[in-house]
Amino acid sequence: MPYFYGFDWTYLVIVLPCILLSLWASSNVNSTFKRYSQITSTRRITGAEAAQRVLLANGVTNVRVERVSGKLTDHYDPKSNVIRLSDSVYDSPSVAAIGVACHEAGHAVQYAESYGPIKLRAAIIPITNIGSKLAMPLILIGLVLSFLENFSFAMVYAGIACFALSLVFQLVTLPVEFNASRRAMTAIRDGNYLTGEEQRGARKTLTAAAMTYVAATAVALAQLLRLLLLFGGRRRND
């Protein structure tokens, strides 16, 4: 039984641990970035310069590097062919800034090389966006029309299927992010952007960032399992 004396144990046992993991991952990436953003690299190249070097080393000449406001708002925009680096990365020569900048440049290189997983992620974004918006409304419609039985269950499971698309997106995102980090560390090592000890700091920064995607995947999986337990059990009981 998903409910015990009116208490939903599925949330406590399945979802809450993953949410706590997500909170820890978010805190960890902030603290790790803060730590290594205070360490100035020996070569003293900025994040923007590091990103540009990665692009040139891979023959990518049609991508601009721009500044964007905010903290940890760094991203690559494939529609505009622009790498946007936050204030704490763009003109910073810190170990963390170089790691993050090279990671975003790694995404630009992925697009330039038609890296499979990132093409797949881009292709499914419209579908997953629609699915995430329809999931809860469909489930609610199914619950409200529970007296219609078969139609009700069809709506509920259609909603669960739509929600499952968010998990698919997270699963596809994982190899994209890990690959971008590997590209970043390879570029840093081959380009001699950071010393050996500084490279370890950049790797820790990127690993902390990667954990946020792992946590997001865990949360999506937990929520999907919870929905299946709640409504699968409900159908058996009915």
Image (cartoon, rainbow, N blue to C red):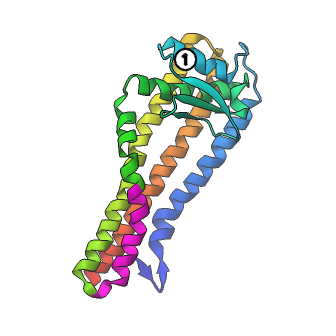
Q: Which residues are magenta?
A: 130-147
Q: Against 172, is 155 above or below?
A: below
Please tell me whether residue 140 belongs to the stretch shown in magenta. yes
Q: Position of residue 115 (x, y in %)?
A: 37, 28
Q: Against 56, is 17 above or below?
A: below
Please tell me whether residue 218 belongs to the stretch shown in magenta. no
Q: Nearer the viewer, residue 111 or 167?
A: 111
Which residue is at a point 63% across and 41% down the rendered structure image? 29
Give the total number of marks visible in the rendering.
Answer: 1
Which residue is at a point 69% across and 27% down the rendered structure image? 90
Tell me, yes or no, if residue 204 can be seen here: no
Crowd band around label 1 with a 10 angstrom C-alpha radius: few (<14), some (14–19), many (20+): many
Which quadrant of the figure contains the C terminus? bottom left
Q: Position of residue 99 (x, y in %)?
A: 61, 26
Which residue is at a point 66% across and 14% down the rendered structure image? 195
Image position of 169 (left or right of 199): left
Tell me, yes or no, if residue 2 can be seen here: yes
Q: Position of residue 201 (x, y in %)?
A: 65, 27
Circle 1 residue = 54
* The image quarter in which residue 3 lies: bottom left
Q: Position of residue 51 (x, y in %)?
A: 59, 21
Image position of 106 (left or right of 94): left
As helix, strand or loop, the secondary structure at mark 1 comes to helix
* The image quarter in which residue 40 lies: top right
The kind of residue tagged 1 is Val
| Main SS category, magenta section | helix
